[in-house]
Image (tube, rainbow, N blue to C red):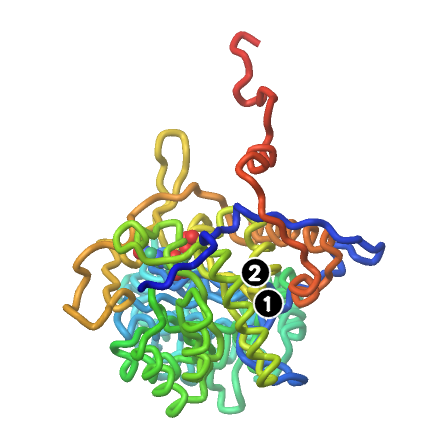
Amino acid sequence: MAFYYTEPSRTFSEFLLVPNLTTKDCNPSNVSLKTPIVKFKKGEQPAFSLNIPFSSAVMQAVSDDRMAVALARSGGISFIFGSQSVESQAEMVRKAKSYKAGFVVSRSNLTPSHTLKDILELKERTGHSTVAITDDGTPKGKLVGIVTGRDYRLSRDPLHKQVSDFMTPFSKLIYGKAGLSLSEANNLIWDHKLNCLPVVDEQQKLEYLVFRKDYDEHKENPYELLDANKSYIVGAGINTKDYEERVPALVAAGADVLVIDSSDGFSEWQKETIQYVKSNFNVKIGAGNIVDREGFLYLVEAGADFIKVGIGGGSICITREQKGIGRGQASSLIEVAAARDEYFQETGIYIPICSDGGIVHDYHITLSLAMGADFVMMGRYFARFDESPTRKLKIGNNFVKEFWGEGSNRARNWQRYDTGGKQGLVFEEGVDSYVPYAGGLQENLDKTLHKIKSTMCNCGSTTISELQKNARITLVSATSIVEGGAHDVILKENSISGE
Ligand code: IMP
C-alpha cells in the first residue's frame, strides 16, 4: 500500500510569525544576516558565508555575469545558468570573477598596429570607452598605451590611422603599481583628474583598470562578497549529464561554488556527479532539489556541501500540474530542517539548506529562515530588476521584464528534468511569462532587507541562527488570511469618480 502523509503539505502563506519580546538593543541596525552556504564542523567557520541570505536562481532569465556581480556586490550569490554551452557559461564566470571590487581586468584590448576603425568597432561591440593597448592585445599583456575618446577626432583622423599614432603612450600615462590599495588608486584618480587608472606589474604588464565610477559604487557596498583576491564570489549551475566537460571549465574560470540544477535531485545521477566533483576538484558543490528527509540524507551522504529544497513551488513552474510531483514549500522545509538539525546533533556537521522557489512576499523570506533555511534562492524576485538579462518591454502603461522557466520550450533545459529516458524536452514543466519591472536591484534589496531585519527584531532575534531557535510560528486559518490584508475599507486608488 502506498504511503500517505497524514498532514496536508503547506506553503508559506499559511503561516505567520508570532512576536517575541523585543529588547532595546534589538533594532534593525544591529541585525546580522550573515549565513553559511557550505557545510562546516561544529566550532569551525564555513569556507564561505553569505552576507545576506539571498541567491539568484540558476535560470537563463535571471543569473548571468551582470547579475552575479550586482548580487555579490550586495552580499549574496548568483548561480550562473548552465543551460548554455560550456564555453559561454565559463566565459560568464570569468567575466564576473574579473571584477575585483573596484579592480577590473581590462575587457577591451587591442595592439598598437590596430587601426582607428578597429577601435570604433570594438567600442560599438562592448560599449567600453577605454581601450587598453597591449603588445599582444591581451588583457594581461605589456601595456603600451591607452585609447579613450579624447585621443582621436573622427572628423579629422582617417579610419586606417594606426593606434600607435594616436594612443596616449605608456610614457605619458599615470599608472598604479601592482599591489596598491583601492584607496591609493582612488587618490591617484582624484589627484590627476583621471577617469581610469591602469595598474601594472614590474614588467609593465597590465593587471587591472580602476575606474572612478567603480570606486564610488564599491564604497557604498559594505556587504560585498569577496574571495581572498578581492574578486566577487561567483556560483554556477551544472547538470548530471555533461559534468565531466562542464565542471573543469567552470573551475578553471574561477567558479567558487557549484550547484547541481535539477527539478528532482533524489537520484543516483546526483550522487555520481557529487562524487566526481569531490574526487577531482577542490570546489564546493550543492545538490538538490529534494523535499524530504530521505532525499536530504541521501545527498548529504553523497558528499554535498549544501542542499536545495523545493519541488513545484516556483512562480513559472507547472511541474505539479504536468506530473503531479511536488510538495508545499513550507512542509518540505520544516521536514528537511529537522533532518539537518538531527544530523548536526549526531555528527557535528552542519549542512546549510537553501529554500528554492515560491517566495512571493518579502515576509516569505523571513518565514523560510525561521523555518530553518540558511538562505533562499529566488527567480521571479530578481527577474524584475534592471540587472536581469532579459528584455524590458512596455505592455499597455506598464513596464515588464521577460521571465521564462528552465523547463519551458524557450529554455529547453532538458538536463534539468531528465529522468534517464529520451534526451530532450518532451513536455514543458515551465511557462514563458512577464514580471512587473521593478527598477534596480540595490534599491529593492535595501527595502526587502530592512523588512526582514525589522521582522527579526519583532521576533527578538539579531541573527539568523537566533531566529531559527527563537521563532514562534503559527498556522493561519483561511479567514485570518483575509483579515491580514486591508479589509472593509474603500481603497483610495479605486476612489469615487468625480472627486
Ligand atoms: P521563483 O523564485 O518562485 O521564481 O522560483 C525559481 C525556481 O523555480 C528556480 O530556482 C527553480 O528551482 C525553479 N524553476 C526554474 N525554472 C523552472 C521551470 O521551468 N519549471 C519548474 N521549476 C522551475
How far across and how far down the image is residue 71, in percent? 51, 62
Q: Residue furthest right?
A: 24
Q: Horizontally, is 217 left or right of 105 in the view?
A: right
Q: Nearer the viewer, residue 253 or 323?
A: 323
User: Are there few (<14), some (14-19), or many (20+) residues within 10 Å of tag 2?
Assistant: few
Amino acid found under the numbered disc labelled 2:
Lys
Q: What is the C-alpha distance between the residues marked 1 and 2?
A: 16 Å
Q: In the depicted view, which residue is nearer to us: 67 or 118?
A: 67
Q: Amino acid at mark 1?
A: Glu
Can you name the residue that lies furthest to the left here?
422
Using the rendered image of the protein, determine whether residue 168 is visible from the camera's viewpoint. Answer: no
Residue at x 65%, y 64% (from the top left corner): 468
Residue extending furthest toward the top: 498
Relative height, residue 7 to residue 207 (above, below): above
Ligand 1 closer than 8 Å to the CB at disc 2? no
Whether residue 364 can be seen here: yes
Position of 381 with respect to 153 (left or right) is right
Looking at the image, which residue is at 35% across and 66% down?
81
Q: Nearer the viewer, mark 1 or mark 2?
A: 1
Q: Quadrant of residue 418?
A: bottom left
Quarter holding residue 182: bottom right
Residue 315 pos. (x, y %): 39, 49
Residue on which the image places disc 1 = 224
Q: Quadrant of ligand 1?
A: bottom left
Label annotation for residue 213 = 2
Tag 1 secondary structure: loop
